[in-house]
Structures are given as structure tokens and as C-alpha cells.
Amino acid sequence: MKRNVLIIGAGGVAHVVAHKCAQHNILLGDIHIASRTLGKCRAIIDSIKEKGSQCGPGLLKAHQIDAMDVEATKALIRATRSQIVINVGSPFLNMSVLAACIETGAAYLDTAIHEDPDKVCEAPPWYANHEWKRRDACRAAGVTAVLGVGFDPGVVNAYGRYAMDAYFDEVQSIDIIDINAGSHGRYFATNFDPEINFREFTSTVWSWEDSQWKANAMFERRQDWDLPVVGKRTAYLTGHDELHSMSKNLGVPNIRFWMGFGDHYINVFTVLKNLGLLSEKPVRTAEGLEVVPLKVVKAVLPDPASLAPTYAGKTCIGDLLKGTRHGKPHETFIYNICDHEASYEEVGSQGISYTAGVPAVAAAMLIAEGAWDVGQMVNVEELDPKPFIRLMNRIGLETRVRDADGDRVLDPYEESPAMASITS
Amino acid sequence: MKRNVLIIGAGGVAHVVAHKCAQHNILLGDIHIASRTLGKCRAIIDSIKEKGSQCGPGLLKAHQIDAMDVEATKALIRATRSQIVINVGSPFLNMSVLAACIETGAAYLDTAIHEDPDKVCEAPPWYANHEWKRRDACRAAGVTAVLGVGFDPGVVNAYGRYAMDAYFDEVQSIDIIDINAGSHGRYFATNFDPEINFREFTSTVWSWEDSQWKANAMFERRQDWDLPVVGKRTAYLTGHDELHSMSKNLGVPNIRFWMGFGDHYINVFTVLKNLGLLSEKPVRTAEGLEVVPLKVVKAVLPDPASLAPTYAGKTCIGDLLKGTRHGKPHETFIYNICDHEASYEEVGSQGISYTAGVPAVAAAMLIAEGAWDVGQMVNVEELDPKPFIRLMNRIGLETRVRDADGDRVLDPYEESPAMASITS
């Protein structure tokens, strides 16, 4: 039983995480929000109060912190008596926040892989470059660290794990497909931190094919998919966090990630990239000012949080598995549909932030009640997916399955009743 | 008889101006090049020596200067005993360099209208906002100041003046058309300082129609033109310096400026503009750095001077006049064709810089020999165009005329022999 949550970060995902934690504070205890900018933390608390999201009594408090400072982070964890830290700040912070958790014994959760500000492209598997180096330290300290527990990575890892076990003898391929069929009505915007968003697409696209890493260029491979609710959509092979752990943990020879992009997004992205404006390397202006172009692009783009009020439409994110079942070819799509307007109505965020934030809170709840408090560092596909999927069904992200038997809501315990007694 | 030239600026146009001055230093005397960055001035001198451009003996010297500093500029004019100052630095410098000329008696030449760094769009006519306020001061001091004597503005003003007088009873319209049919082979680049280039297109497009100012948006009006050598080309109504003086000085009811743009240029421009990256107003990055987006765009784009070695193709710039001659409808296109590769061969610059720089040197030569040393502030259409056109024919920019009688090189004294004796 772990109690009291410290949320690091105050962006769009942190906003959702804070609202959802507040909705479940009877289980989670005190909720603390800390970021570099105190005002942003306070704004989230104001929004929680406005929506009436807080369920039971308990602290709801804002803090200023530079989370690159391990000592300061340790001090805050101790001062707030937080036993669970949800890191939804910049991915540059992962390793320092993780260090603070290992040294204080707090459970650690994040939603994106660590990034080194100076390196856009590292060699796969990316987790091995940073996080996995602390696996032994976590085990020695008995610290639970659940890496990448947003939607993708996170839920899609659990989907892959669950569907493999429940529906297949053998899986040949997992195609993770992420389609945002929503519209924000602005000329151009990214749905989360532009700096992180663009970095995903400026480097080599790594995918796991025939049991090895294969390199492609961004927008080199495209494929059309016919998906539930959002219909026919074009998506592009993209490098993504979850491939780097799923390739190691699942034993599936082909794992790919496909992200939907409209022509307008690709055009803007291509112009900015070709001009050098997405570079993380500083340039010098004629006046002698050193500046990182990507940070200026970020400064002129809309704050992703500002898109929420006018965002309409839905997202569809899921895993398409192909393989064999009882010796015959079998195919399953396991997915979620999230509605931007419903997300805004509930917590004041658009669906991209909502789908990333809710799973992290579900994971925190499973740690709080013990089911996922495993005392070591894991990626999501290493954990039992059933309590996670069931809990998300209850707290805002419903899982559905489409296969030869039709399209239905997934209750993981109903489908595999034999397993229910183990984890529920 | 004025001698010794001080060139302010060390960009692409300054490079051409310096080469051309050196070619004609027997008339012009010592040549001094001054800019904020001494190394750029020295590089130009090295290039002149490499090409063997210098014709007679005489100084060729680099200087460091902040030309916003009027006292420093005056001191340099005096120290170098320069009687002619060719200002081809940033248009932000015009008013301070002009002040230094007025106070020292040196003749002043520039190739672009003054710009206030903080105001992208001022009310027409733009010359009245800055330069023309010093007209009385020039007259009182007997200082010759020829404003805007590049190609456009500059040569096109002389073309308008010449063609009106030589071929028409009455002119209804002058359409100035500027087509660069060359290719630099880079993803994207501007042909001169990106900061100045983009500022031309980010504000209201003013044109002179039915004897009044009319406002349009950029890329709102397009027209196809069938031109000599470069063929059929699409150009867009654009605001441009020369409209602001020609509308006042020529008595023609319609004067428009059309600039050719390819779809790729427009796409890149549109993306940058819509994102706010062409703004001259500072933004603040997440790290708290204040930075002007346009200056960052400038920093990532190729230096226009670097385009020259691979630039191929030609430019076509000219004036299409429509009106009546002997009571009948008449139409004349007076123009120049410039070849990028030939320009590079001669002076190491692409054609855009070449067409802007050569006219300024022609004007300096006409001041040196007296024909244009008028002791007051003028725009080019107020001066006799014939010696200017004839001199340019000789020094690198040949003028041609296309009308019902065919297409031919223009010798302004041959066409109007009665006038020849006055100015030659």
C-alpha cells in the first residue's frame, strides 16, 4: 500500500494526471504537483477545483522545482511523504527523477523514454541507453519503476501482451497504429510539447522486422488502414519508444509503429526540417545571439494545452496482431477510441493528453493497491495487463477488440475467466 | 568631379559594387569598404584581387564600422576623403549614413528604402516617412543624394521615365515585372538578406491604381506574363519601393509591381509566415531567451552570397508601359536580361546581386563625372535616364525594348538623337 503522489511537470499530460489523481485521492492520498513554473502548477489546481474533480479530503498542493536537481527532488519527495512519483515533465528529466526515487524508495512512473537534450538519435534499443542501466539499482532498493506507462508507450504494450496471451498460439507481427482523427482548428499545432514531438520525427525511423532493427527515413513508408470509428486513414512508419522494450520482451519477430499524419502536417514539418528549424543544435544570429532553432519554433507554436477548448473528433490507437490460433491464421485489433470533446468536458484537456495521462494514473492506482507494486524496474508488457485494462475501462479509457467474432468491449477477466482469480 | 568611394556594407550587393568600382577606379579613385564585420570587407578585397578586377592604381581598403553611429561614419568619410558614399548595407542604416553625408558634403547613394527595424509596414508613400524629410537639408547643403539606385528600385524608375518620354503621348499604366528564372539548386534560399526579403512580403501590398493607393494582401493577385527569354511566368502583385516615388513623380495613374514566385517559394513562405516565424517581434523561449524569430530564420538559411557558384539561369526585369502614341493604343516592354553564370564568372556573384549593384556604380560614375551630381535629393526617375542607360549598356547591364517594331537593344541617344547633345 503506497500513498501520496508527487506529479512532476505541469503540461497537458500533467494536467490530466492531476485531475485523475484528484478523482481517486481516496486511494492515492495527497496530491502534489511540481514543475519549474509554479504558476502552471497552481493553474492546474485551480482547474481541479473548478471542475470539482477532487473526490475525498486530502492535500492538493503546488511546488516549484528544477527536477534536474536530484537533491531538491529527493527533498521534495521526503517533505511531501510521496510514495509514488509520476514523472510527466520533459523526457530530459527521467534519469534525475528516477535517481531521486531510487534514493528515497518512492515508486517511479513515466510516460516517455529518457532523452538526452544533445542527442536526437541514439542507437536502439533506446531504453538500454539510459533507463535499463538503473535496473539493478531499482532491484537492490526494491523500487518499483514502471517505464513508459502512457498510452503509447504504455497501454499499447499491455494490449500486445494481453492479445498474444489470450488469442494466439503464435504472433508474427504487432502493428501499433496511432490515429488522431481530431481537429484543433488552428493553422498548425503539435498535440504535445513541440520540442519532443518533432524530435520523434527528425531522426532515423527504427522498426523491429524479422527479429532485427531496420532503419528507414521518416515518411518513407506509408500504409492505409481501415479502422473502427475513424475509418480509412493513412499512417507512416515511425520510430517509437515501445518498440524498444516490446522487441526484447515479447519474442515477436515484427513490431512496427504507425502514426497518422495529414498532408498539411507533413508539409509544415518538411519545410521546417529542410530549413534546419527543427535542429537542436544552436545557431548564431547576425547579432551574435546563440539560439536553438527548435526552441524558437516551440515558442511560436500554440501551447498544446490551448488547443483543448476547440478540439473536436476522436483518436483511435491500438495494436493489430497477426499470427496463428489453433493452427489457423488469426488477426485481432485491440484498441481504444477517445473523444476530444468528452475529454475536455471531463478534465479540460484534449484527447491526446487524456490518453497519455489516464494510464499513468491507472498504473499509480495499481501500485497504490499493490497489484503492480513489483519492487523492480519494468516496462508495461512485463506486468499483468488484465487489472490495468479493467481499471482503465472504469476510469475513462475503454478497451475494445475487433476480430473475426466482431467488435466488442474487452473485459479481460470475462474473456479469460481462468486467470481472473490470480490477479483480482 | 567627385572622387573616392566609400562602400557601406559587405553583403552580396556590396560585393558587386566593390568589384565594379574597382573596374572603374580610374574614374572613381580610392575604394573603401566598411561594414560591421571587417573580415567580410577583407574577403571582398581578396576576391577583387583574385579576379583582377582593379583597373588602375589606387587604394582598396577594408574598414570596420557601425554605420548606425553617425559620428563614426562622418569620421570615416573624412579620413578616407570619400566624396561618394554607396550605402548597400542594411536598409536600417539609411538615415544615419545619409546624415553623415549631409554633414560632410559627400554624395549619397542607396539601393533600398529606409526601414525602421520595429515597423514592418508603414503608410505610403514610404519615402515620405524617412528620406524625403531630409530633402531640404540636402538642398541646403548642396548634397547629391540618389535614392534607390539598384535595379528595382533604380533602373526600372529610369526605364519608366525614358519610355514615357520616348514612346508615348500618354501612359495609362506601368507594370514593373521582376522574374528570376534562375535556380540555385538549394532546398530554399532568398536571393538577398532574408530579413529584408521576407519583410517585403509580410505586410500589406500597396499598389498605385487609378491615382490612389490600393491595399491588397500578399499573393492575393497573380498574373501570367509572356516575357522575352524567360517565357511564360507567373508573378504576384507586390509592394515595392519604386511605386512610392514613381507614383508621385511620373503622373501615371497605374503603377504596379509584380514579382515572380514559384509554388515552392510560396509554400515555404506561407508556412513560415503562418507559424509566426517571420515576425520581427521577439518571442520568449521556454528557457526565457528573448529572440526575434525572423533573425533565427535568417540564421538557418543559406547566405545569399553562397548561392552564386551553382546559380544557373537568367533574370528578366523590366517595365511594361501601356498608353497612347500618336493617338493610338501603344505598348512597350523595356527590360534587361541578366545571366547568373555570367555574373559569377565576372565578379563572383549571382545575378540578383549583380543587377542591384551595377546600377549603383553607374550612378556613382555619373556623379563622379558630373552628369548626375545634382546637389539635391532625388529619386532615379527625376534624373535624365539616357546617360544611365547608355553607361549600363557598357558596364554589364544591357537594356532592350520589345514593342510592335520588334525586340532590340536600346541606345537611348540613337532613338532620340535630338536629346543626345544635351547630356553627352
Image (tube, coloured by chain):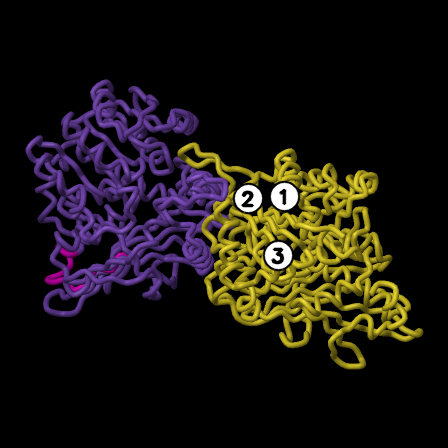
Chain colours: A purple, B yellow
Q: Mark 3 falls on what kind of element?
A: helix
Q: Position of residue B286 (x, y in %)?
A: 41, 35
Q: Residues within 10 Å of mark 3 (few under 14, many from 20)?
A: many
Q: Circles 2 and 1: CB distance less than 8 Å?
A: yes
Residue B281 appears left or right of B81: left
Q: Amino acid at mark 3?
A: Val
Q: Position of residue B340 (x, y in %)?
A: 56, 68
Q: Residues within 10 Å of mark 1 (few under 14, many from 20)?
A: some
Q: What separation in Å lies between label 3 and label 1 (alpha carbons)?
A: 18 Å
Task: State the residue lying farthest toward the bottom.
Answer: B405
Q: Amino acid at mark 1?
A: Thr
Q: Nearer the viewer, residue A33 or B365?
A: B365
Q: Which range of residues does the magenta coloring cover?
A: A164-176
Q: Residue at x 21, y 64 (%)?
A: A331
Q: Circles 2 and 3: CB distance less than 8 Å?
A: no
* Residue hosting label 3: B17
Q: Which chain is mark 2 on?
A: B
* Residue hosting label 2: B63
Q: Position of residue A34 (x, y in %)?
A: 32, 26
Q: Which chain is mark 3 on?
A: B
* Same subunit, tags 2 and 1: yes
**In the image, which is nearer the foreground, mark 3 or mark 1?**
1
* Residue hosting label 1: B80
Q: What separation in Å lies between label 2 and label 3 (alpha carbons)?
A: 16 Å
Note whether residue B199 is visible.
no
Q: Nearer the viewer, residue A345 or B320?
A: B320
* Same subunit, tags 3 and 1: yes
Q: Mark 2 falls on what kind of element?
A: strand
- The quadrant holding residue B380 is bottom right
